[in-house]
Structure formats: structure tokens, C-alpha cells
Image (tube, rainbow, N blue to C red):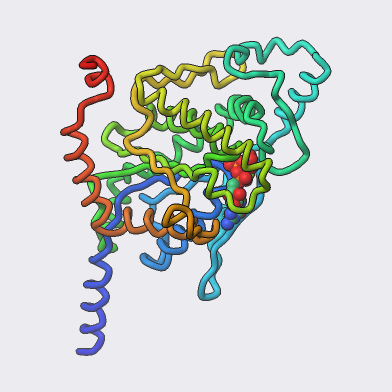
Amino acid sequence: MLQSNVIATEETRRVSNFFVMPTVYIGIGGYSKAVFPTLDRLIHEHYGFRPGPLQFSIFDFDEAKSESSANGKKYSIEPYLVSLPKKTLKDVAKKLRRKADLPWIKTFKPYVAFEHVRYAEAPGLNLFPQSGNLAWRLLWESHILPELKTKLKGLHPMPHELHELQRQGFKVSNRSCIWVVAGGGSTTGPTGLIPIVAELKRLKPSETNLFVIVFTPNSYRDKTDPQRTRGRAIFLATMESILELFNGKVFDQPYNSNGNYRITLEEDPCDHLFLVDGSFSGGRTELKTEELGDLVATYLFKFATGPVGEHLLGKIGNLNSGLKSVKEVSNEI
Ligand SMILES: Nc1nc2c(ncn2[C@@H]2O[C@H](COP(=O)(O)OP(=O)(O)OP(=O)(O)O)[C@@H](O)[C@H]2O)c(=O)[nH]1
Ligand SMILES: [Mg+2]
């Protein structure tokens, strides 16, 4: 009897140490598949399950799955992978090649360079950024928007969910975060990044922090030289567009074919943008894709499950409040 009481007390003490910051992780394209399974595994190993306030989604035009395994358990992306079909892109690319008239995509004309839209029978979007630019628009209302809305609900646990978590010994943070994870030197990641971030900025609760992690072209260790060259050009163009948004440019573009659904962003796209390239000592040491994915997963894990995240958010808030906006500074120059 005495022993079981001791065990119960031990158990209660251990469980009541649990802390969680409500966080939504949005992966775009292949690179997030190197991060999310490890993150999911770390979360499961820590709590025994993945609590509702931690939500995952990966959007990809490549249906390949990835997983992390340890101690005989597998953590696959399958439950949260949103496989984006390429059929409409394929049909449009075929018709464009035949110079067919496609009145229903005219809405996109100022925003998509149709002459560069290509389709290849291979996973992903194959370094054709204009194909990505078009493909996201064709699927936005059916595949992207509903998923984002559903996952964002995790940031605000319902009272009964909160009560259940507290009963299980969780302390749930008042702060919350969204992390968007994308490769920057490929196609799906970079072309989905700006619309997804702009959409999240509109949909998210105002107090939720929005952070973006982009892998630099240097972190694509398995690509050929020509692929890396194209990837670098896509990365530079994407970064330029993001910096323009930080500099006050308004993003306002149609994301359905009849033009009545637009994504609009008139403010900074995110709170912080992290560029990850996994090289140390000026490039003398480089991490492999898996190592880099694990490193980012560990950081994200610690941010949501321990005191590090809240501590950093406090510091970042204090730093930001002392900064002048770009517009203020440019007015002074
Ligand atoms: N560990 C792991 N790494 C992956 C996986 N898929 C992709 N990667 C890594 O992520 C990098 C980027 O993936 P890509 O598929 O080329 O990028 P993307 O953003 O999906 O763009 P496109 O495929 O060009 O449309 C690759 O070079 C790989 O190093 C995966 O399933 N597991
Ligand atoms: Mg891919």
C-alpha cells in the first residue's frame, strides 16, 4: 500500500511537470519531411503522445512519405501529409503547349509567366517555379485553406480540452507559435512560402507568433550542380520578394481561377525569418540533410516543450519594442 502511494506521488510529480506551448507546424515541400518525423518522435517520447495543441501539416506535390523510428516505433508523416495533386497543372501545361485558349486562368495572367509553365512526370515541381506559382493557385481553396483553418484551431484549445490537459498535469502556455518550414532552393517550398505565410498572417490569432525557417541552397547536399544553380536563382528571387514585403510592399494576388479569392498582406510577413544552411566554420564542416533536419527538429521541440521558447519570446518581444520600423528609419534618411 505504502509502495503504491509512493509510485502514485512519483507519477503525479512527473506528469505535472509537463509544459506545452500551443504550436502549429506547417511544412512546405521535401525539406520539411527531414524535420517533422523527428520532431513528432521527440514529442511522443517526451509526453507519451502528441497533445492537441501541437498540430502538424505538410503540403507537398510529391506523395512520398518519410518517417523516423526508434525503439521499434515508427513516426510517419502519413497522418498529416496533404498530398497535392498535379493533374490540373498537367492539363493546363498541355493546353498551354498547344496554345489553346484558356479564359478561366486569365485572372492569373499578371502574376504567372505562362510561357514558363512546364510539367514533368516526376515527383515535385522539378525546378519550374512558374509551375509552382500556378499550381498553388489551382488548389488553394480546395486543399490549402481548409487544412490551415483546421490546424490553427489547435492554438486555442476548447475549455474541455484545456481542462483535460490540466487534469493530465499539463501547464499550457498563454503564448502560441506557428512555424513554417520550407526549403528555399527548390520549387514547392519557395513557391508556396509567401502565399502560405500571408494567409497564416490573416488567419492566425493576433497574439500568435509567426516564424519562418528556410533552408538555404547550400543545405541541398544531394542535388546536382545544375539543380543547385537553378535552386540558387529561385532562392534569391524568393528572398527578394520576402524582403520587399518587409519593406512595405503589399502582396495582393488571386488564388482561385475566377479571381474572387485573393490573398492580401499589407504588413510584415512574419516575426522572424531563420535561414538555415548547416555549415560551420565558414563551410569547412557541413551537416548532412538528416543531421540538419534533426537539429532543426530538436530546436523546435525544445521551443514548445520547455522553458526555452517562452524565455526567448520574452526576450524577442523586449528587443522588438526597442527597434524602429524600416519605414521610420527610411523617413529619417
Ligand atoms: N530526410 C528526408 N529528406 C528529404 C525528403 N524529401 C526531400 N528531402 C530533402 O529535402 C530537399 C528538398 O526537397 P525537394 O523535394 O527537392 O524540394 P521541394 O521544396 O519539395 O521542391 P520540388 O520537389 O522541386 O517541387 C532534398 O534535396 C532532400 O535533401 C524526405 O522524404 N526525407
Ligand atoms: Mg519535392
Residue 60 visible in the shown view: no
In the displayed structure, 177 sits above or below 17; it is above
- Closer to us: 146 or 163: 146
In the displayed structure, 86 sits above or below 325; it is below
In the picture as drawn, the residue positioned furthest to the right comes out as 98
- Closer to us: 286 or 247: 286
Residue 212 in the image: x percent, y percent? 41, 40
The answer to whether residue 64 is left or right of residue 91 is left
Q: How many marks?
A: 0
Quadrant assignment for the C terminus:
top left
Rendered residue at 32%/46% (across/down): 157
Q: Quadrant of residue 209?
A: top left
Rendered residue at 49%/54% (across/down): 36
Residue 74 in the image: x percent, y percent? 55, 66
Quadrant assignment for the N terminus:
bottom left
- Closer to us: 216 or 57: 216
Rendered residue at 66%/47% (across/down): 63
The answer to whether residue 2 is left or right of residue 127 is left
- Closer to us: 178 or 162: 178
Residue 298 visible in the shown view: yes
Rendered residue at 63%/25% (across/down): 134
Residue 34 in the image: x percent, y percent? 54, 55
Residue 317 in the image: x percent, y percent? 20, 39
